[in-house]
Image (tube, rainbow, N blue to C red):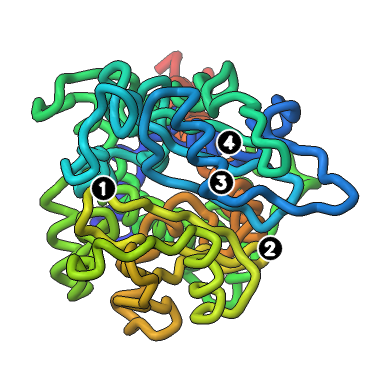
Amino acid sequence: MKKGFTWRKLFNDIHLWLGLASGLVLFVVCLTGTIFTFHTEIEEMLEPEKYKVEVPANAVALSPDVLIGQLQAAQKGKVTALQIPQDPAKPYRLTLKKGEGGKGGKPEGAKAKTGEGPKAEAAGPVAGKGGKGGKGGPGGGRGTTYLVNQYTGEVKGTTEGPAHGFFEAVEGLHRTLLVKRESGELNPGKIIVGASTIIFVFIILTGLVIWFPKKLKNWKQGLKVKTSGNWKRINHDLHNSLGFYSSFLLLIMALTGLCWSFDWYRQGASAVLGDQIFKQRSEKPMTSDLAAISNQKPGLSQLIQTTNGLLPYEGNYRITLPADSAAAVVLSKTQSGFFALSAADKVQLDQYTGQPLKVEKFADKKWNEKVAASVKALHLGDIFGTFSKIIYFICCLIATSLPITGTLIWWNKLKKKSKQQQVPTRPAVTSPAVSQV
């Protein structure tokens, strides 16, 4: 006798068939997301000769202006950005674009194409990293990031390397399944990943409905794994319990990840939040006072000192240098530490006078603005520093296992159902007397 319709059965069927349809893609996306979580730490660990500097006894770093001048003279280019870590044992990172600012380069008043716009931000989690000459050849794209010893001025290398190349491939697999298309063309890999992510959202929601017990007194069963059971029971409990524990963060990862997959989704989410997602890089710097152009410019050390007065805490700096003679200097500062919030405070200073033009503190933003500004950090898992990255790593590892454990549950039920259908019906037993009649 067939069972009648129930909402629980409907959700179970939706959960099952959506999982089977997208399981392979979700396995790849979750696995690459797991691997990518600690990509920065792994790169630095594999190449310590580049990512560590020896701190001298009297640790006094050279002026950022001196380091910039030396690199520009050696590489015949223009430094567009500078990263100063709080950790004195880590080198400075200078992003340089060749063919600009040096011999044969563009004049200072010419606006440089930095590749940092809405499309660059939407391109992926590591859109701010430059490769050799940037993407598009020497002098194009985002430029090359050099690692410079701040105490000696020695160039230790660039961020390029085997580990960096590996994680670029991992990111490409995560976002587009390594399918490449020219700029402006629809990428089928990106669409497949985005569609699978939408499916994943429904899988999570239907999974939560299925997890909720029929009888409230049995709710504890869904929170633990019965290790004393057979492997089928253990597999079922792993899928059921671990899926529940990780569901909230997986939902955040999926909903934020869609901001890279579809423009319509990002625009819709921005409308719901009341603030534009990825607007940081589309915002143009404020205008410096051109009347003071004849005055002597303050050095970066002085600008950093001014910013420290406005943002009185230790942290990491990312400084975006003016692209032309009118733009302001933009200094972003983030806290560092195991539980440190990754959100940046931003200060814009006049490049001629050093006067503050705009101060944006993350703590002063409205709730919706904080969420919109934190989409990237929420997706990558570094919203609360190393602590949240560890949590995200575990959740991504669980997410990678869910397609496997879910498929095994379906396969076991399929075999059980097949065996039940193959059981022969026993013939009716008749007595000899009856048969003789």
The alpha-carbon separation of the residues under discs 4 and 3 comes to 27 Å
Other-residue count near label 3 (Cα within 10 Å), few / some / many at <14 / 14–19 / ≥20: many
The alpha-carbon separation of the residues under discs 3 and 1 comes to 52 Å
Task: Specify whether 158 is left or right of 268.
Answer: right
Which residue lies under the disc numbered 1?
Answer: 323
Quadrant of the rendered structure where residue 234 is? Answer: top right
Above or below residue 148? Residue 425 is above
In front: label 4 or label 3: 4
Which of the image's four quarters has the C terminus? top left
At label 2, which amino acid type do we have?
Gly
At label 3, which amino acid type do we have?
His
Q: Position of residue 385 (x, y in %)?
A: 61, 60
| Residue 337 disc label | 2
Compare marks 2 and 1 and give the one earlier in the sequence.
Answer: 1
Q: Secondary structure at mark 4?
A: helix
Q: Position of residue 45 (x, y in %)?
A: 73, 32
The alpha-carbon separation of the residues under discs 3 and 2 comes to 34 Å
* Residues tagged 4 and 3 counted as in contact (Cβ below 8 A): no
Which residue lies under the disc numbered 3?
Answer: 239
Compare marks 2 and 4 and give the one earlier in the sequence.
Answer: 4
In front: label 3 or label 2: 2
Asked if one can make out residue 428 in the rendered structure from this viewpoint, the answer is: no
